[in-house]
Amino acid sequence: MKRKFYVTTPIYYPNDIPHVGHAYTTIAADLFSRWNKLLGKEVFFLTGTDDHGKKIAEISNKNGKTPKEFTDELIPKFKEAWEKLNINYDRFIRTTDKDHEENVKKILQKIYDKGDIYLGEYEGLYCTDCESYYTEKDLIEGCCPIHKKPIEKLKEKSYFFKLSKYQDKLLKFYKENEEFILPNSKKQEVINRVKEGLRDLSISRTSFDWGIPLPFDKKHVCYVWFDALFNYHSGVLEKDFWPADLHLIGKDILWFHVVYWPAFLMAAGIELPKKVFAHGWWTFDKEKISKSRGKVINIDELVSIAGSDSARYFLLRATAFGDDGDFSEKALIDRHNGELLNKLGNLVSRVTGLVEKNGIEKTENSLAQYLNFPKINELINNFEIDKSLNNIFSFIDICNEYVQRNKPWETKDKKILYELIDSIKKIAIVLYPFIPETSEKISQKLGGFEFTKEELEIDFDPNKKIEKGEPLFQKIEENQKTIKEEKPEGIMTTNEVNFEDWSKLDLRIAEIEKVEDVSGADKLYKISLDVGELGKRIICAGLKPYYKKEELKGKKISYFSNLKPRNMKGIQSQGMLLAASSDNHEKVILISPEGEIPNGSRIG
RNA sequence: AGCGGGAUGGAGCAGUCUGGAGUGCUCGUCGGACUCAUAAUCCGGAGGUCGUGAGGUUCAAAUCCCACUCCCGCUACCA
């Protein structure tokens, strides 16, 4: 019987088109899927979308569509993106799929019957205008972040999952399954937090209806994670792949996958997955990926820089899997030119060119010993993806050295060329899970071969026709860049900004009401603003070296109101004011309206 | 604040668990070789008090222990 391997990505939230973060998890899943196929295993690779939830309901509403219509329109964007990246998934699941809904209902009923789901009261912070709940974090000075109105505490009947009951069972499980939470560095973090205690989890809502209704109380819909997590189980109900070998996720959702998820499964009496691996985040030009600041790179942009394989290669090679990485166009181009083109592309070009002229003659490949397949396999299984690539590329270096040392262009030694061709074939096979397009191209140049572990052992057939053909990679010059260099203090860094993006910014005229020092900060002022219809706001600004408090008071300024709030020296800064500054930052002046206009007036 | 991670030639990393001359990789830089190859490739050089502590353990510390500084992440019903 064939050994099986089941790998998943999270189901993505289809409220916008996919970006590099989504791509990363999915590419990694594709790598593990293809690698295990190469090993001869029977593989199932599941990805998809989480169509349910309050946010989707709201966004759809805003766009004048039903949630189903809205998500139906976005899902193709995901599928197209995965196609562009050569993602070979076996199923694209949606939480609105019938089999998933049935599965979730069945399991809910089962856990309810068992007594692990009970009716209780959910007390939340509720804004009547939004008709929705917020968490403490969302609030701005105790007010709704959208309507700026005081929030009220509201109780609602809700079903709860007895998460608390599973605290010890989970800790025991972690102990017995050391590889369940990966990477290791994250494990202790989770364990410590679980030890601090688990609260029961509200898993239903009556305040909206876009979700799976609870089978034992139709007034409630199943809330977020319960529904979403079970996709992994629903996806292979008929397939005999459960339990999953590997859930690949971003580190932001680790908690849900290693606490809620196993607890749900325990309650439902279902076997637990083997491994959950949380990878790191990508920053973009050293800044956190953020839609509102234009710090996003979508899949079209990603692929347009240097092609799908280079994008895959870069993401898998640039950072240790699990660590955070920084994405920049320059870094991607450097890897593309330096590693894929100069090392691999050039090796293939020079060797196939020499073979076209001189031919090959079968002999034992003395280089083969330097391609350490067991080691590469071990590295991949240990999630050391960057090192596995490093290992493969050091073999490419060995091949280039071999050409250099033996000068086949002088000696016309057919045996040397055979060794090199056979080595290139092996390289293409092991690289296939990483950069499938390139491996296919190499296979074509060498007359075709399979990408399997067995093929790796088979000597190259010298009668096959070898063609140099087109180069594998095109050189990308600096000035060919598709995305422009970051401007130092710029808001948007993609080279063109849609009007839509611009209109996301809410810029207002505001009046400075009060200015205070911030203790422990030599540049910061705490500034209270009157923003007319938006009410009062507090911001922090580094104006101390440039303005005296008295000078600021009563001044009208330009204010960026919907910037995500952040804490500065313990004060939450709600937005930022606009100022112009000279190159060396010596001179900083505020941007103020040149005439009288009411506070809160829009700028744009 | 608590918990977790990090600080290594100009840049980015590995090495730390299991102590053994600052070892390695990529980029950059300087010099050379080659001219088959997409001006690609190959060889060699320069460059580091391994965050700080005239700390501790040890014959021996980047590695183990302690203290401190600075960065980053997480702190749950938000996918």
Image (tube, rainbow, N blue to C red):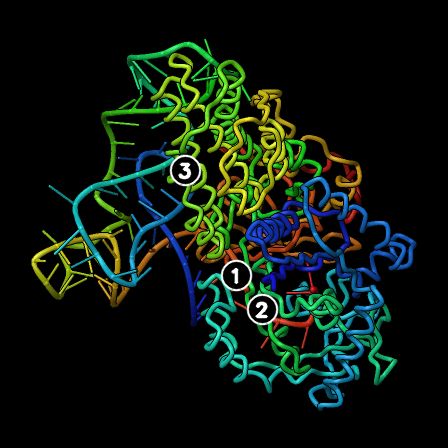
Q: Is residue B2 above or below residue A537?
A: below
- Residue A515: tell me if it is visible: no
Report which residue position mark 1 lands on.
Answer: A570
Where residue A456 appears, as percent x and y from the top left, is 51, 42
Report which residue position mark 3 lands on.
Answer: A368
Q: Residue shown at 53%/47% (left/top)?
A: A453
Badge 2 amino acid:
Trp
Callout 1 and callout 3 share a chain: yes
* C-alpha span from label 1 to label 3: 60 Å
Where residue A128 appears, as percent x and y from the top left, is 83, 70
* C-alpha span from label 2 to label 3: 44 Å
Q: Secondary structure at mark 2?
A: helix
Viewer-closest of A574 and A532: A574
Q: Earlier in the sequence, mark 2 or mark 3?
A: 2
Q: Residue shown at 52%/39% (left/top)?
A: A546
**Quadrant of the drawing holding the C terminus of chain A:** top right
Viewer-closest of A402 and A219: A402
Which mark, by number, is residue A255? Answer: 2
Apparent side of residue A304 relative to residue A340 in the rendered image (left or right): right
Q: Is residue A406 above or below residue A59?
A: above
Apparent side of residue A124 relative to residue A31 in the rendered image (left or right): right
Q: Earlier in the sequence, mark 1 or mark 3?
A: 3
Q: Residue shown at 48%/32% (left/top)?
A: A422
Where residue A204 appears, as percent x and y from the top left, is 77, 77
Q: Is residue A178 above or below residue A428?
A: below
Viewer-closest of A96 and B42: B42
Q: Secondary structure at mark 1?
A: loop
Q: Quadrant of residue A417?
A: top left
Q: For label 3, count other residues whose C-alpha is less than 10 Å away and answer few (under 14), some (14-19) or many (20+).
A: some
